[in-house]
Amino acid sequence: MLFMKVEVYDPPMCCSTGVCGPSVDPQLVRFSADLEWLKSQGVSVERFNLAQQPGVFAGDAAVKAVLGTRGDAGLPLVKVNGEVRSNGVYPSRDELAAWAGIGASTASIFTDAVAELVAIGASIASNCEPCFKFHYDKARKLGVSRDDMRLAVDMAQAVKDSPARSVLSLADKYLTEPRPTASACCDGAENTAPGGKCCG
C-alpha cells in the first residue's frame, strides 16, 4: 500500500474522543475508533480542532474555502493525501477504508451500549456521582444489564485501586524495613558535600 495520509478538521469542541463530560457522543466515539483502526493499517492520521488550532484551518486554502462558504457546518472536513473527500459529516469506516485503498474493514464493536459501559467505568475512576447516575440511566434505556454494568464498575475499580496498592506496598516496605543512612547517590562520607548535604 502506498503511503496514505488522512487529515481530519474537527469543529470546535473540548476534545475529539466523544466521552468528555456527562454525555457520550456515539458518533465521535465510533469515528475515533475508526481512525485508530486506520492507524493500525499503516495510515498516517492527523486531527485538528478549530477551537484549539485555528491557525491550521486558516493556513489551509481548501479548508478555509469550505469555512468561507459553509461556516462551521462544513466541519468536520476530511482530506486524504491532500484531497478533500468529505465535509459536514463524519464518514464511515468503510468510506475511510476505500479512500485509503484498504481492503474490507472489520466492523466496529463500539456500540452505544458499549460506550455507556465505558462511561460508567470512567465515572467510577473519576469519582463522579452525577456522571454515574447519568450513564446508568442511559445504559438501562439501551437494555444494558446490571450484571454487565457491575463488570464495568468492578474492572474500573480494580484499575483505580492498582496504583493505590502499589504505593501502599512501597510505604510499607520503607516503614517496616531498616533503611540505610546513605542514599543511592551518597554511598559514603566522601560523597557528602560540606554542610552534610547529599551530593552537593
Image (spheres, helix red, strand yellow):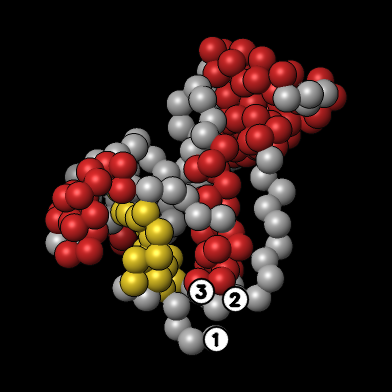
- Depth-wise, is mark 3 or mark 1 nearer the camera? 3
Q: Which residue is rendered at x = 55% and y = 86% of the image? A: 1
- Residue placed furthest toward the bottom: 2
- Element class at badge 3: loop
Q: Earlier in the sequence, mark 2 or mark 1?
A: 1
Q: Which residue is rendered at x = 68% and y = 40% of the image? A: 111
Is there a contact, CB below 8 Å, between mark 2 and mark 1?
Answer: yes
Residue type beneath disc 1: Met
Q: Earlier in the sequence, mark 3 or mark 1?
A: 1
Q: Which residue is mark 2?
A: 102
Q: Which residue is rendered at x = 37% and y = 54% of the image? A: 87
Is there a contact, CB below 8 Å, between mark 3 and mark 1?
Answer: yes
Q: Please rate how many residues cluster around mark 1, counting C-alpha atoms within 10 Å: few if below 14, some from 14 to 19, many from 20.
A: few
Q: Nearer the viewer, residue 197 or 190?
A: 197
How far across and how far down the image is residue 146, in percent?
Answer: 81, 20
Q: Which residue is mark 1?
A: 1
Q: Which residue is rendered at x = 54% and y = 12% of the image? A: 130
How far across and how far down the image is residue 71, in percent?
Answer: 23, 43
**Is residue 51 shown left or right of residue 140?**
left
**Is residue 92 shown left or right of residue 140?**
left
Residue type beneath disc 2: Ile
Residue 162's place in the image compared with 124, above or below, is below
Q: Please rate how many residues cluster around mark 2, counting C-alpha atoms within 10 Å: few if below 14, some from 14 to 19, many from 20.
A: some
Question: How far is disc 2 from disc 1 in space, using C-alphas?
Answer: 8 Å
- Element class at badge 1: loop
Q: Which residue is mark 3?
A: 100
Question: How far is disc 3 from disc 1 in space, using C-alphas?
Answer: 9 Å
Is there a contact, CB below 8 Å, between mark 2 and mark 3?
Answer: yes
Q: Quadrant of residue 154?
A: top right
